[in-house]
Image: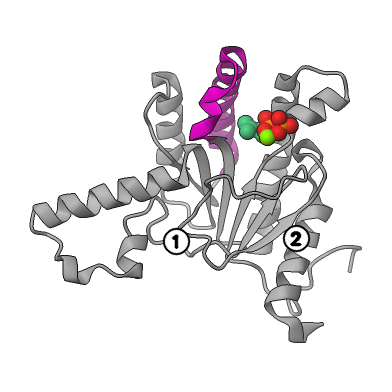
């Protein structure tokens, strides 16, 4: 076996891995580059991690690429990111093949027509793929998602298709953007920040958290393997 590989006999693979891609700006600053180049460099480890997780048999992979709070950044940076997301979804569409099922999670409000169109085309092109569900959390906020779920439930109650007595945890899960998907097992966050930042609040109730000081553009195979090993260590201590 190669160094730092996962022995699938020994380790359990998390069903749902969620990643907070953080530190693109600091990565660029360290190199004397504009922040935007950090964002561009950050797309590569996203693509690599998708491939690796698919090969490992992860069922759901969620990337937090733009939070509902990120609109506070400079107009220039937001405009660059939105352009990058258009390119990213178009590229994904060519790379998903028959394996990856891409979904946008988050609010559609304030996203450009061009981006919404690109997202829709990629979702459509990959909707019958059953290998790995890839959620791109873009313009996403965890509390907002809960508000949306509450509104959906209230609407169904008002229309008479849902009885309030039937509300339980499983039913609430089915009103979330991640309806039908397993809860998050492992959250990975780069760049040394140890915060949740309004990410998948409902779905992460039992998630294990793994942090690295490295910046997102430097994230690679070894980080992923270390995170999965850590997940195993604290989930199934008898293994070690
Ligand atoms: C993460 O990197 C990318 C996005 C949120 C779009 P940051 O842009 O947060 O980089 P830092 O944290 O300023 O270094
Ligand atoms: Mg940041």
Label 2, label 1: how far apart the Cα atoms are:
21 Å
Instruction: Give the left or right position of residue 126, taking residue 48 as reference.
Output: left
Residue 215 seen: yes
Q: Which residue is mark 1?
A: 181
Viewer-nearest residue: 36 or 121:
36
Residue 98 placement (x, y as % from top left): 53, 49
Q: Which residue is mark 2?
A: 227
Position of the N terminus by quadrant: bottom right
Which residue shows up at 91% across the image and 63% down it? Answer: 3
Residue for point 42% across, 46% down:
143
Kindly identify the residue that appears in the image at 74 percent across and 27 percent down: 25
Location of residue 91 in the rendering, given as x and y in whole percent from the top left corner = 59, 31
Residue 86 in view = no
* Highlighted magenta segment, given as a residue range: 67-96
Find numbered disc 2 in the image and state the secondary structure of the residue it sits on. helix
Q: Residue furthest bottom?
A: 238
- Of pointers 2 and 1, the one earlier in the residue sequence: 1
Residue neighbourhood size for the residue with mark 2, other residues' Cα within 10 Å, grouped as few (<14), some (14–19), many (≥20): many
Q: Is 228 in front, or is 34?
A: 34
Q: Main secondary structure of the magenta part?
A: helix
Measuring 79% from the left and 73% from the top, which residue is drawn there? 7
């Amino acid at each position: 076996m190669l160094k730092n590989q996962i022995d699938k006999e020994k380790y359990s693979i998390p069903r749902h891995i969620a990643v907070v891609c953080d530190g693109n700006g600091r990565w660029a600053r360290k190199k004397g580059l504009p922040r935007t180049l950090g964002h561009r460099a950050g797309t590569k480890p996203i693509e690599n991690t998708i491939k690796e997780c698919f090969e490992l048999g992860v069922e759901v992979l969620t990337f937090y690429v733009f939070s509902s709070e990120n609109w506070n950044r400079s107009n220039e940076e937001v405009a660059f990111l939105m352009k990058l997301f258009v390119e990213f979804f178009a590229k994904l569409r060519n790379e998903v093949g028959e394996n990856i099922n891409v979904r946008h999670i988050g609010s559609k409000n304030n996203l450009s027509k061009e981006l919404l169109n690109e997202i829709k085309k990629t979702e459509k092109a990959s909707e019958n793929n059953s290998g790995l569900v890839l959620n791109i959390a873009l313009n996403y906020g965890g509390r907002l998602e809960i508000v949306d779920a509450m509104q959906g439930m209230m609407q169904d109650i008002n229309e008479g298709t849902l009885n309030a007595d039937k509300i339980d945890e499983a039913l609430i899960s089915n009103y979330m953007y991640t309806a039908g998907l397993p809860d998050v097992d492992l959250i990975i966050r780069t760049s040394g920040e140890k915060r949740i930042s309004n990410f998948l609040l409902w779905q992460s109730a039992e998630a294990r958290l793994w942090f690295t000081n490295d910046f997102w553009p430097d994230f690679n195979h070894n980080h992923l393997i270390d995170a999965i090993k850590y997940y195993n260590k604290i989930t199934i201590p008898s293994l070690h």
